[in-house]
């Protein structure tokens, strides 16, 4: 795995979500890519920025989590790895946010109130097996780069607003994709993924047993092991 691997997270998370995976892939060039500010110009602009980074870096693979999955599935000419995000429709919470007008949504995403909700039992504590993982400092570290500035908050809001149409308009392809899926995710269950992968030529699924939505944060060792194995197979 000598060529770079780009890691992209969807809002409200920054690519800091992959820092544990990055630390464990010793000898690999793992780069964390943030796209929320670019999304101010829409998802096509964010996708173009991601394509430009792939070309500039000579990346061999792009690894996307959560609401970044549809963008990664819209790439061509690079190994695409996805984990626990939308491939056909948004989870109910993201869909509800996507229905809010962009300016109001950007205001809702202000960190003081939104991070408090994320730390609650109704928020990110459902996204991990151990709810104590989502303490104040961790939630702030994962989301401040996206929620902490007006520009990136506005980009996150536009990203959410445009995702339903992006999924409906056929931008994505699962052909040849590698899916590393936590099988205990209440937001994006594994069964629809199994069905979708079944009908996609060359697609492969690796299961992270007991992994919930934020397994890259909670179980980075499992993600890094499966990612290294999947990419070594892809390179061979």
Image (spheres, rainbow, N blue to C red):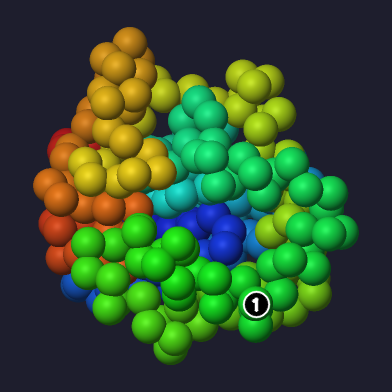
- Mark 1 sits on what residue? 113
Q: In which quarter of the image is the N terminus?
A: bottom left
Q: Is residue 25 above or below residue 64?
A: below
Q: Is residue 116 above or below residue 58?
A: below
Question: Residue 227: horizontal and vertical position, in percent?
Answer: 22, 51
Question: Residue 128: horizontal and vertical position, in percent?
Answer: 29, 62
Asked which secondary structure carries label 1, the reply is: helix
Left or right, 66 with reference to 101: left
Which residue is at 36% across, 76% downward? 134
Q: Quadrant of the C terminus?
A: top left
Which residue is at 22% across, 32% downward? 205
Quarter-wise, where is residue 21 in the image? bottom left
Question: Residue 185: horizontal and vertical position, in percent?
Answer: 30, 46
Question: Residue 74: horizontal and vertical position, in percent?
Answer: 56, 33
Quarter-wise, where is residue 163 in the image? top right
Which residue is at 43% across, 51% downward? 65
Is residue 37 visible in the rendered structure shown here? no
Residue lying furthest front: 121
Is residue 118 visible in the rendered structure shown here? yes
């Amino acid at each position: 795995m000598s060529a770079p691997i780009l890691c992209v997270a969807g809002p409200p998370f920054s690519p800091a979500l992959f820092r544990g995976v990055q630390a464990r892939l010793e000898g690999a060039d793992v780069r964390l890519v943030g796209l929320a500010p670019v999304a101010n110009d829409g998802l096509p602009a964010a996708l173009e920025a991601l394509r430009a980074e792939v070309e500039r870096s000579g990346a061999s693979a792009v690894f996307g989590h959560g609401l970044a999955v549809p963008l990664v599935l819209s790439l061509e000419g690079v190994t695409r790895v996805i984990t626990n995000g939308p491939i056909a429709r948004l989870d109910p919470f993201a869909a509800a946010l996507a229905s809010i007008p962009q300016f109001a949504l950007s205001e809702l995403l202000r960190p003081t109130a939104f991070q408090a909700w994320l730390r609650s039992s109704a928020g990110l504590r459902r996204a991990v097996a151990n709810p104590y993982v989502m303490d104040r400092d961790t939630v702030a570290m994962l989301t401040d780069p996206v929620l902490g500035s007006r520009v990136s908050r506005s980009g996150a809001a536009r990203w959410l607003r445009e995702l339903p149409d992006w999924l409906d308009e056929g931008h994505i392809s699962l052909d040849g994709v590698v899916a590393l899926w936590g099988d205990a995710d209440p937001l994006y269950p594994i069964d629809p993924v199994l069905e979708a992968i079944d009908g996609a030529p060359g697609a492969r699924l690796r299961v992270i047993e007991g992994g919930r939505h934020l397994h890259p944060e909670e179980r980075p060792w499992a993600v890094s092991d499966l990612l290294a194995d999947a990419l070594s197979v892809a390179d061979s």
